[in-house]
Amino acid sequence: MKNARRYCYGPFQSRRLGLSLGIDILPRSKVCTYNCVYCEIGHTKPDYLVSPEYRVQDPPSSTFQKELKSRFEYTTTLNSITFGYNGEPTLNENIIDFLEIAKEERDKIDWRHGEPKLTLFTNSSTLYSKKIRDRVKNFDLILAKLDAGNDDDFKRINCPHKDVPSLETIIDSLVKLKEEMPKENKLAIQCLICDSYKEDFISNNNDRNISDLAHAFKKIKPNLIQVYSIARMPANYFVFSIDDERKSEIVSIFRGIINDDKIEIKYY
Ligand code: SF4
């Protein structure tokens, strides 16, 4: 018998989101435009490392609504309904159909501590497309990845598919997204910095990258910057987490260069 399609995972306690219900809208195991060295769900298999133009045609089945109803029945204290977890969710052509169903079901509930945010994790690689930006800006909170401030670090850390645009284009799309978003919705940049045991692998924890990142954030003007590191088993054995002292130092460097009190910068 074919395994039934499953969309909802958790809820889990998340360091950055509180109590979060995970939503996976990709039909197979991980499909992504990146193969990040630190990925906590393993390597991207060669056939599933896809172009940012690749689209998954997979509208929500009735199971999605049923799963949400049953989770919400027992969990009326969620902080976030979070799209992501298993690759790049913006590759699903039907992402807005999923969002509308989640919004509809969320709005039916009398939440005990305020309604949960509809949150999207994206690796930012598809945001050069206006069509994709017009979709993602409907989420209450967008958590967009930016681990590198220049193409050298980007290629080493995120190992993008060959069709992924340059980092300059990605930064420019984040600038556009922030300008186009409704003011009530928030853009957070997730910035994972790691170290390396391997002598011939320079991690993104280097002075040039930290400074380039800060200059990129200054242009993007996100609402929040989240600096964090590896917390689970990474895809490659040779990368490891930076400590809290270094995270705090990076936050200070960012604050110094960005020099904008409206941008909140935190480490986790
Ligand atoms: S973008 Fe996310 S899912 Fe894709 S390889 Fe990187 S960490 Fe893994």
Image: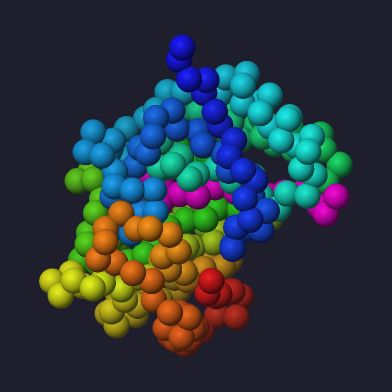
Q: Is residue 247 left or right of residue 107?
A: left
Magenta stretch, main secondary structure class: loop
Q: What is the residue that sits farthest to the front in this orientation?
A: 1
Q: Is residue 139 left or right of residue 193?
A: right
In the rendered image, is residue 151 in sight?
no
Image location of residue 171, percent across then percent down: 37, 60
Q: Nearer the viewer, residue 128 or 126?
A: 126
Q: How is the image coloured?
A: rainbow
Which segment did they paint magenta?
Answer: 112-129
Q: Is residue 15 left or right of residue 243?
A: right
Q: Quadrant of residue 88?
A: top left
Q: Determine whether 89 is above or below 17 in the image.
A: above
Image location of residue 252, percent across then percent down: 48, 86
Q: Residue at x 52, y 55 (%)?
A: 143
Q: Quadrant of residue 100?
A: top right
Q: Determine whether 18 is above or below 89 in the image.
A: below
Residue 119: say if magenta: yes
How many numbered discs, if any?
A: 0
Q: Nearer the viewer, residue 160 or 21?
A: 21
Q: What is the residue that sits farthest to the left in this orientation?
A: 200
Q: Is residue 13 left or right of residue 89?
A: right
Q: Quadrant of residue 263?
A: bottom right
Q: Residue at x 76, y 43 (%)?
A: 75
Q: What is the residue that sits farthest to the top in this orientation?
A: 1
Q: Nearer the viewer, residue 7 or 145?
A: 7
Residue 231: say if magenta: no
Q: Determine whether 255 is above or below 238 in the image.
A: below
Q: Residue at x 29, y 67 (%)?
A: 239
Q: Residue at x 35, y 78 (%)?
A: 210
